[in-house]
Image (cartoon, grey):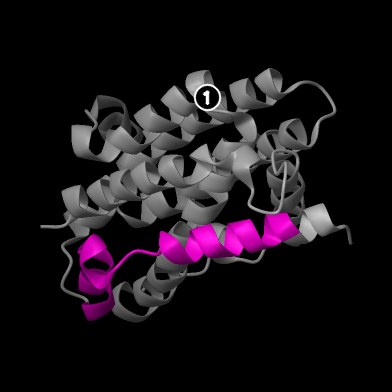
Amino acid sequence: MTRQTRTAQEIIAATSADLAPSADDNRLVPLVEAGTAPRAALAQLALEQRHIIAADRRAFTHLAERSGRGTACAEFFGMLAEGEALALERLGAYESACGLTPETIGQYRPAAGCQAYPAYVAWLALNGEPPGVALALTANFAAWGGSCSRLAVALRARYGFDDEACGFFDFFASPAPELERRAVAAVASGSDDEHGEGVGGGAHYGRLLQRYESMFWNTLAP
């Protein structure tokens, strides 16, 4: 393992710790864990995610193209785009468990507070420096994965959802060693020195991403 790779791991760990959400940043998940969140909120989560997944997949594909074929960043963003396609496949079972029909899904109008996150990801796809964006997304995924893990447990225990219905959340909660390896390589490609100045914008990007994710959860909370 090279010094640069070790430095990238340290940058990712430090940024993830700095951006870790507080208890007040997500009002929905505790309600689901208590079994008091209305099923309408669970359904809205699914409806919003269908829009977010489509937008994020296009943004990640664009970031991969911007990064240059065969680069570490291109491999990282390409894998993220593939992951969104897999997530979409798992979302259908959750939508069905929430009682959503194709008609309901087609007629739904997304909420601005939920769509601020993918709108900013799209901005990053156009304007962000790829290694810094890789750092921001990786730090944010730590928080997102933790929320998904809690939801997967709570939906089974409190709402009787089966494994197939919880597959969407299990997907994001599960360890992804290959994605982590590619994230380290992507961040390392922008780490020009031991202070990681080459990915200096990543912490700023990540701070906004975390705020927009908080908006997502709290827009859904009753």
Q: Nearer the viewer, residue 182 or 3?
A: 3
Whether residue 100 is visible to the viewer of this picture, yes or no, is no
In the rendered structure, which amino acid carries the disc numbered 1?
Ala
Q: Nearer the viewer, residue 21 or 116?
A: 21
Q: Is residue 166 magenta?
A: no
Judge from the rendering whether residue 154 lies leftward or rightward of residue 186; answer left or right: left
Tag 1, which secondary structure? Answer: helix
Residue beneath label 1, please? Answer: 125
Q: Main secondary structure of the magenta part?
A: helix
Q: Quadrant of the N terminus?
A: bottom right
Picture layout, residue 31 above or below residue 134: below
Q: Quadrant of the C terminus?
A: bottom left
Residue appearing at x 42%, y 42% in the figure: 204
Residue appearing at x 54%, y 58% in the figure: 172
Range of residues picked out in magenta: 7-34
Question: Picture coordinates of residue 178 (x, y %)?
Answer: 77, 55
Judge from the rendering whether residue 152 lies leftward or rightward of residue 175; answer left or right: left
